[in-house]
Amino acid sequence: MGHVLPQEDARAIATAIAQSIVDGFDEYRTKFEQISAGAQRRFEQADWLGMQKACTDRVDLYDLSVSLVTAQVKKEAGNYSLSTEVWRQAKLAYTELIISRTHGELAETFFNSIYCRTFRHKEIDDTKIFVKTSLPKGWEPPKTGIINHYSLNGNLPKLISQILDDYAFNIPYENKRRDVRNIVRHLRDNPHFGMPMNSGARLEIIKTVFFRNKGAYIVGRSLSGDGSQSNPFVLPILNNEQGGVYVDTLILDPDDVSVIFSFTRSYFMVIAPIPFEYVRFLSSLLPTKKVYELYSSFGFYKHGKTEFYRDFLDHLDQTDDQFVIAPGIKGMVMTVFTLPSLDSVFKIIKDRFHPSKDMTRETVKAKYRLVKRHDKAGRMADTQEFSNFIFERSRFSDELLEELLKVAADTVEVTEDKVIVKHLWVERRMTPLNIYIDNADEEELRSAISEYGNAIRQLASANIFPGDMLFKNFGVTRHGRVVFYDYDEICYLTECNFRRIPEAQTIEQEMASEPWYSISPADVFPEEFIIFLAGRRRREVAAVFNELHYDIFDADYWQGLQNAINHGEVMDVFPYRRKKRFSRK
């Protein structure tokens, strides 16, 4: 409970704590924005390795900042760092300090992080941290005008030319006239646009450019004069690596824009001094996206976690269904449960692993941290990590409680009315690929296997080898994309030693039940990947996979990728289909 001290002394210590956290938050935000602001220079210089490093550094920055500020707070509070009264007062003092700020919601999350680090994620309630926001209902930061407005009345080519000028980089367009022609033709031919070119129709485009990996994105929307019709308008810009840039395509389909902002993508670099305004605007483009997903897409993944938790509590208040074991084959390392009315799953590390899994709990945690810091290439699901997550026991089915206590008793504590999970990850729920394939028609099967192979290829291009490529470790999103979500055997592609199976020299070797050749832990034999295609429809699956992705069975394919990565090459992974790209002729 901490030490008891006079109210006046508690207030003085609390005020000092609040000021230290605000100062630490300001320093964090300054560094965060500096890293984000450098994205344009890296893009113009085609410094793709620098872009990757900046993304990792920015993810690491939060934890580093929290560690430094927590140490400072403990030093200032001394023996009273665990005083509940001090932290109640600190929250009140902190609220006063952030109420007029343009990013007060992010500041609340930073305070929560310091508290949780200090109390080891225990004694959490709304009197000491911001479980719910303390910002006034309907709070909005001062508007600064993040949007450029363009009238759609008049000459469309001239308008598009003006937009490209307004968003010009410090290197020239490769062929601006061609880009304008491509955009205009696409607008006129695309049913998703359908905007009357009169009566006040307009384009609204965010002033700052979004950067990620090797792309820059001009993001906006078209609006009819009365505001009743709205449609996304996203221009991906690429660097030709010869001193120029070009418009690669125009994305107007809301589903395609949703994929660009997917939970399977790395975080954007964008200068967003007032994140709330950006989230509000993007919510109008992507109404199916949750607020927490949009905050995370900018790199504010910790505040995304806060928003998720608040949504989760609201969802529980509005529903009465019970948590159940997640559908699919049970994992050897993780146990997974879900709430049928919620589009998320909860993943817990088991106490003991299957004998074939030679790893520890800390190894599994490290794999998930690797994914958080690495380019997800649109093929790995983002996760939120929680400690001491408390559920109402009444929402758990008897079957689920029995399963959790059987396989994860070291992590799960059950009281009379609570289920307390010491450590878990939350991840988007998808249809397991093995279940999807079993129920797919011929066209769906072909698409799923094509996507499965593409997922493996794109992960490899990002220097990721999944390890266990069984269908049960992949999921299918609502957009039909195949995504990897089981990370316990993941590793860098460059750590693997891809080999061909040596040809047998004798009949005895050929007939041996065990490999007659030596195998090291890092050895991978692509010829054996056929075993991952097992299932009720194995023949159909193998036929499609062989047709579309036969080279994945060849060690030369993997060695070629390793070679390119080792020589510093960063390969193209587009968040839209290649057939959507404009011609550069």
Image (spheres, rainbow, N blue to C red):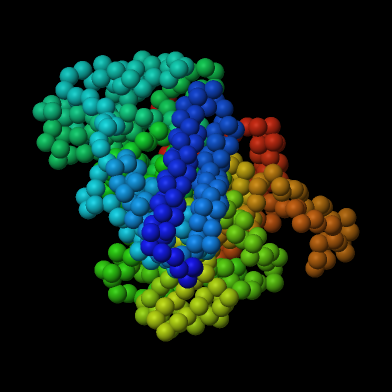
User: In this picture, is 323 found above or below 547?
Assistant: below
Residue in view at x 29 percent, y 64 percent: 314
Residue 418 left/right relative to 403: left
Residue in view at x 89 percent, y 59 percent: 506
Residue in view at x 21 percent, y 39 percent: 230
- Using the image as rendered, state which of residue 282 and residue 31 is in the foreground: 31
Residue 548 left/right relative to 189: right
Q: x and y percent of residue 400 in the render?
A: 46, 78
Residue 564 left/right relative to 116: right
Residue 285: image quadrant is top left
Residue in view at x 19 percent, y 25 percent: 152
How many numbered discs sit on the rendered protein?
Answer: 0
Residue 351: image quadrant is bottom right
- Using the image as rendered, state which of residue 516 and residue 14 is in the foreground: 14
Q: x and y percent of residue 225 in the render?
A: 13, 32
- Using the image as rendered, state which of residue 469 and residue 225 is in the foreground: 225
Is residue 8 something one can see in this rendering? yes
- In the rendered image, the quadrant that contains the C terminus is top left
